[in-house]
Image (cartoon, coloured by chain):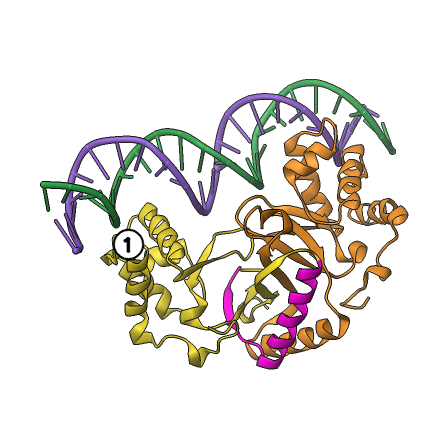
Chain colours: A orange, B yellow, C purple, D green
DNA sequence: ATGAGTGCAAAGGCTTTGCATTAGG
DNA sequence: CCTAATGCAAAGCCTTTGCACTCAT
């Protein structure tokens, strides 16, 4: 699988559940209703969600179960924990599902939106990062790129 | 001041203290010994430091004072709080002092190193980000770029 | 039946805050 | 002198963990 995957390459919305079920099965985990609800919530959003947002999108899921299930889903490789500012951790579906993208963070309200940049720039950047990483003795796994600014409603 | 500042443009090591004193004075804050110690610790490092690291580099500074002083220094615009993984927050001197750079994060041990990428790539990237940000209704302030990988000692 | 999953509540760990004391201008 | 800064300890807040109960296989 290519490092830089386009939105078009990502798993179709209808197949997300099946994909997740497979990945969970691979590590011997069940695809319970609570996990289904979480995946559905993440799948329906076009941005990483916080725990409070996930809880309000599901019904009757305990906070501790949300944390635990997200951890399981992360180990299964279908969920990624996104660190933006101090506040809460946010979660999104993996790049295999969502496609490669970056985040735009509002420095005022903390709002986070997904963004994509042109492929050629992505490629050039990744190549340059690989070089500097190697030079510093790092084995690069991936890169993280955020745009920090002020969102529409905060201006 | 240019958005992309080279290391060569950054404030000379000897002038850091003076620069900080000025910035603190601008917001009516004193340049106390505790703050001098913190700035000296950050100034001597080529990477962002965690609170424990800062505390061990200073003598007799209370943890609460470290947090409070770093907050003041951040408000003065001379210190930046760096969010890498979950762990601890890390702090570094502002880009006006250190020059524009990015971070390489070890996903195993959490080690963070400063890295710089070629200017032309930086410029191209920033331009592209400005476009996508505007398209999404964001007023871009700056970007954040991390290389995630495995460091020399963890391989 | 039998172990994974869940809910509730308590504990953890980094960070912030209250308050009396000390020090800088 | 007088306000800002500091230390110590307590409180906060997100997150993790313990434990008994429930559900699916």
- Relative to A98, say whether D11 is above or below: above
- Relative to D15, say whether A112 is above or below: below
Q: Is residue A137 magenta?
A: no
- Relative to B25, say whether D25 is above or below: above
- Relative to B153, say whether A83 is above or below: above
Chain of the residue on which disc 1 is drawn:
B
Q: Nearer the viewer, residue B108 or A52?
A: A52
Instruction: Please name the residue shown 23% across and 58% down the image.
Output: B33
Residue A13 percent location from the top left of the image? 87, 48
Q: Nearer the viewer, residue A152 or D19?
A: A152
Q: Quadrant of residue C21?
A: top left
- Asked whether residue B37 is in view, the answer is yes
Q: Nearer the viewer, residue B109 or A96?
A: A96
Residue identified by numbered label 1? B29
Q: Quadrant of residue A135?
A: bottom right
- In the image, taking residue D12 as reference, residue B121 lies left or right, namely right
- In the image, taking residue B63 as reference, residue A99 lies left or right, namely right
- In the image, taking residue A31 as reference, residue B27 lies left or right, namely left
Instruction: Please name the residue shown 89% across and 48% down the image.
Output: A15
Q: Is residue B117 magenta?
A: yes
Residue C1 percent location from the top left of the image? 81, 24
Badge 1: how crowded within 10 Å, few (<14), some, or many (20+)? some
Secondary structure category for the residue under label 1:
loop
Residue A1 percent location from the top left of the image? 82, 66
Residue B63 percent location from the top left of the image? 33, 48
> Looking at the rendering, in which quadrant would you find the C terminus of chain B?
bottom right
Instruction: Please name the residue shown 85% across and 44% down the image.
Output: A17
- Asked whether residue B118 is in view, the answer is no
Q: Main secondary structure of the magenta part?
A: helix
Numbered range of the magenta stretch: B110-135
Residue that lies at the very extreme toward the front in this rendered image:
A155
């Amino acid at each position: 699988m290519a490092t830089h995957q386009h939105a078009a390459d990502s798993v179709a919305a209808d197949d997300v559940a099946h994909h997740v079920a497979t990945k969970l099965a691979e590590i011997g985990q069940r695809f319970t209703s609570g996990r289904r609800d979480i995946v559905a919530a993440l799948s329906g959003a076009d941005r990483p969600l916080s725990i409070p947002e996930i809880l309000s999108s599901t019904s009757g899921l305990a906070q501790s179960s949300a944390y635990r299930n997200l951890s399981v889903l992360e180990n299964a490789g279908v969920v990624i924990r996104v660190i933006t500012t101090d506040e809460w951790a946010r979660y999104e579906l993996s790049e295999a599902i969502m496609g490669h993208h970056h985040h735009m963070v509002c420095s005022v309200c903390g709002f986070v939106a997904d963004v994509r940049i042109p492929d050629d720039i992505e490629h050039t950047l990744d190549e340059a990062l690989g070089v500097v990483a190697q030079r510093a003795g790092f084995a690069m796994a991936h890169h993280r790129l955020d745009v920090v600014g002020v969102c529409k409603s905060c201006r």
